[in-house]
Image (cartoon, grey):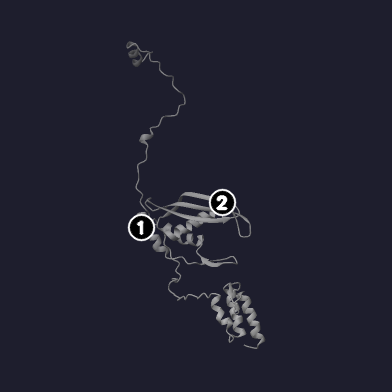
Amino acid sequence: MSTITERAAAAAGRIDTPSAPVEDAPPVEDFTSAAAPMVDYEPGDDDPEMVPVHLAWLRVRKDVRSIAKGEEYDDGWSKYNFRGVDATVMAFAPVTMRHGVNVIPHKIDATHRDTKTAKGKATRECTVTVTWHIIGPRGDIIVAQSQGEALDAGDKGTAKAQSVALRVLLLNGGLVPTGDPDPGSNTIDRGEASVRSAVSYLDEICDPNTSAGRLRQIHFELKQGNLLGALITNEVGAEEQIGAMVVRIGKERAAGGSE
């Protein structure tokens, strides 16, 4: 039996062939009507206050206060105190969490080159420039950059350089003091040491009243100033190295018993 639609189509000169039903076809859902409504976030009792990121970061800085240089580096040649990555992160991590601040690396540009240590061991140097997103509790962002550099004989150079970049960001971006005494609190008046020329010793060397002991002291001073090989005109008008002249006259004075 034809349907009303089919008879109307025939009267209009059309032949509509109904499509065969598809068995077990999944139902078509209208996703446009199923969109979830936007819900404003309401912080709980333990959540941070919803303030702009610049205020949240200011509160982080206020709470961190200072980080002392509590770690020591000593390789047998140089020795100094520093603030390491772990100490810096441990100071910032609970405070940033309390104020709803996230510090996320957004982009990392790294360069590498092969190099060697002073003892000739092969190492790889990595330098990174990291672009950071400091994200506040409301989702707004402060963009910052920092650099880090590291040497490593294995495959940890890039990770080390990024850790250094994180420490630089937190310490510099947080303006974190060490809490140590100001190096400018103690002042020392420095006088300029006079630099004597080889010729300036000539009169004293030739003076017969200059003792052998003083001549030995002059020889030491000339050696300290790298002046022993300087050529001067000696007491007889001949050209002579001043070091050799001091030794010669010193032996003469010592032989004469003059002290």
Q: Which residue is mark 1?
A: 55
Q: Residue at x 64, y 85 (%)?
A: 253
Question: What residue type is disc 2 on?
Answer: Arg
Dot label at residue 193: none
Q: Nearer the viewer, residue 108 or 141?
A: 108
**Are circles 1 and 2 on residues that touch, CB within 8 Å?**
no
Q: Quadrant of residue 9?
A: top left
* Residue 21 percent coordinates (x, y): 44, 21
* Residue 40 percent coordinates (x, y): 34, 47
Quarter of the rendering occupied by the N terminus: top left
Question: Which comes before the other along the chain, label 1 or label 2?
Answer: 1
* Residue 136 percent coordinates (x, y): 39, 53
Q: Residue at x 51, y 50 (%)?
A: 110
Label 2: element kind:
strand
Above or below, 51 against 248 in this view is: above
Q: Which residue is mark 2?
A: 113
Q: Nearer the viewer, residue 24 or 70?
A: 70
Q: Nearer the viewer, residue 231 or 65?
A: 231
Label 1: element kind:
helix
Quarter of the rendering occupied by the C terminus: bottom right
Question: What residue type is disc 1 on?
Answer: Leu
Q: Nearer the viewer, mark 1 or mark 2?
A: 2
| Residue furthest out toward the front | 237
